[in-house]
Image (cartoon, helix red, strand yellow):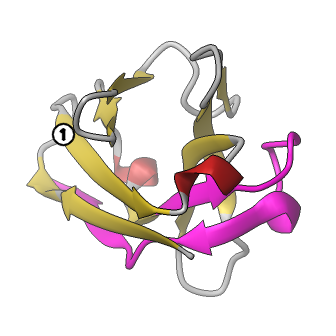
């Protein structure tokens, strides 16, 4: 099993920045990548971004390209989602995702989920 524990999130004004962290533990050899999805009530989870475990390659959804970035601290097995230029439409619950497959834009190959972090962008 793999455990993903999220931290960060909160309330920020439009144009501001927030940082989410995801601490990964357990049987991490089963993971291909770590990333994030987000979800608002009544809608499906939307792909935000992912970073591959082996070489650190990154992939992002069209809605966040150029504004969001993913980094990792290998020594702590912690992954971070840096969110810049936030807008009200970025308001959602953000879920850390541990992938067991190699296609990242859907939830199909997500084997493990974090508990979710609320991000609210409002003035």
Q: Is residue 99 above or below residue 74?
A: below
Residue at x 30% of width, y 69% of height: 117
Residue at x 64% of width, y 40% of height: 33
Q: Is residue 47 above or below residue 25?
A: above
Residue 111 within the segment the image draws in magenta: yes
Residue at x 31% of width, y 36% of height: 80
Is 73 on the left-hand or right-hand side of 111?
left
Is 104 on the left-hand or right-hand side of 11?
right
**How busy is the neighbourhood of tag 1: few (under 14 within 10 Å), some, or many (20 plus)?**
some
Residue 9 within the segment the image draws in magenta: no
Choose between 30 and 85: the one closer to the eye: 30
Q: Is residue 19 above or below residue 27?
A: above
One can see residue 95 in this view: yes
Q: Percent x, y for residue 6?
A: 28, 63
Is 27 on the left-hand or right-hand side of 91?
right
**Which of the 4 image quadrants contains residue 43?**
bottom right
Question: In what element is the residue under mark 1?
Answer: strand
Q: Percent x, y for residue 118?
A: 28, 70
The total of numbered circles placed on residues is 1
Residue named by callout 1: 18
Q: Percent x, y for residue 66?
A: 50, 13
What's the magenta region? 96-123
Residue at x 38% of width, y 60% of height: 25
């Amino acid at each position: 099993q793999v455990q993903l524990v999220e931290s960060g999130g909160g309330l920020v004004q439009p144009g501001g920045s927030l940082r989410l962290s995801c601490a990964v533990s357990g049987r991490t050899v089963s993971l291909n990548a770590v990333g994030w999805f987000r979800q608002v009530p009544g809608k499906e989870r939307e792909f935000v971004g992912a970073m591959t475990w082996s070489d650190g390659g990154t992939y992002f959804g069209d809605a966040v390209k150029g504004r969001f970035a993913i980094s990792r601290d290998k020594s702590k097995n912690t992954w971070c989602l840096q969110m810049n230029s936030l807008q009200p439409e970025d308001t959602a619950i953000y879920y850390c995702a541990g992938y067991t497959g190699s296609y990242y834009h859907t939830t199909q190959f997500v084997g493990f989920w974090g508990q979710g972090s609320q991000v609210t962008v409002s003035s």
